[in-house]
Amino acid sequence: MNSNYDQNQRLSSSKLVLYSYWQSSCSWRVRFALTLKGLCYEYKAVDLVKGEQFSPEFEKLNPLHYVPVLVDGGVVVSDSYAILLYLEENYPQRALLPADPQRRALNLQVASIISSSMQPLHMLSLLKYIEDKFGLEERLLWAQSNIEKGFLAIEKLLKDFVSRYATGEDVYMKCAADDIFLQADVFLAPQIAVVTTRFNMEMSKFPTLSRLYETYKALPEFLASSPERQPDAVH
Ligand SMILES: N[C@@H](CCC(=O)N[C@@H](CS)C(=O)NCC(=O)O)C(=O)O
């Protein structure tokens, strides 16, 4: 076989490296996108509990000391949002951003809400600070109230678009049923998974997201990129 797709897979198997931590939702988004795009990659575990993100070697890749980081030959990209845009531009197979301007903007907006207005407000280092200052109960209430705010906003934003997946169908991309699973879904699926398990979020308040999550849970690419299936998972 000599298709562009196979060529991409061969090339990427030798050069794409993902620095990830199994329980990191930000890493999960990238693992999920790589899997959806059929890209092979080398998995390099960064143990956040042991503090490996602060090692001098990792600091050279990301001076902010966060996973994920993607290395593609000579290119180094950190931050899941930036990595997803990088992948979209350089590995356009199985597009995750639709052509239609409104749906494209909505996908970016949902991804940005999750990565900049939700996850940073419940990341471990911040929660530890809140717990130390105000106690365990305040830590949970803080996380839950910020997650609720974000999810309620996303429910409203998706209202006129949602179908089987978050931002509905895109006539330009409708080659196969799978092609309507887009970037908003890539960010939503791990986010819902993590907050329901970690913060005991009651998802019945978010009927659209609850329904979407049932669909996500059946996707093989979502399961393959899940924390439990990663080489550094602790069972
Ligand atoms: N905006 C960044 C956030 C990255 C981030 O917060 N990563 C977390 C794991 S999900 C991390 O590495 N935390 C390490 C720490 O807090 O020391 C992204 O979307 O990639």
Image (cartoon, grey):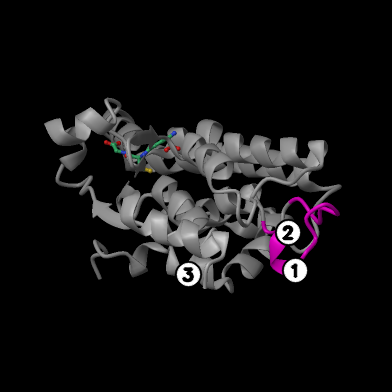
Residue 188 image offset from top left, x and y in percent: 59, 51
Viewport quadrant of the C terminus: bottom left
Find out whether residue 170 is within the magenta segment: yes
In the image, what residue occupies the spot 13% across and 31% down?
A: 56
The Cα–Cα distance between marks 2 and 1, rounded to whole angstroms, is 6 Å
Name the secondary structure under disc 2.
helix
Q: Are marks 2 and 1 in contact (CB under 8 Å)?
A: yes
Q: Quadrant of ligand 1?
A: top left
* Residue topped by disc 2: 180
Stretch of the chain drawn in magenta: 167-181
Say which mark, if any, is on residue 177. 1
Q: Gap in Å between the C-alphas at discs 3 and 2?
A: 18 Å
How many residues crowd mark 2 within 10 Å: few (<14), some (14–19), many (20+)?
many
Q: Find the distance from the CA under tag 3 to the CA under tag 1.
A: 18 Å
Amino acid type of the residue that numbered disc 3 sits on in the rendered structure: Leu
* Three-letter residue code for mark 1: Ala
Residue linked to disc 3? 223
**Percent x, y of residue 214:** 63, 69
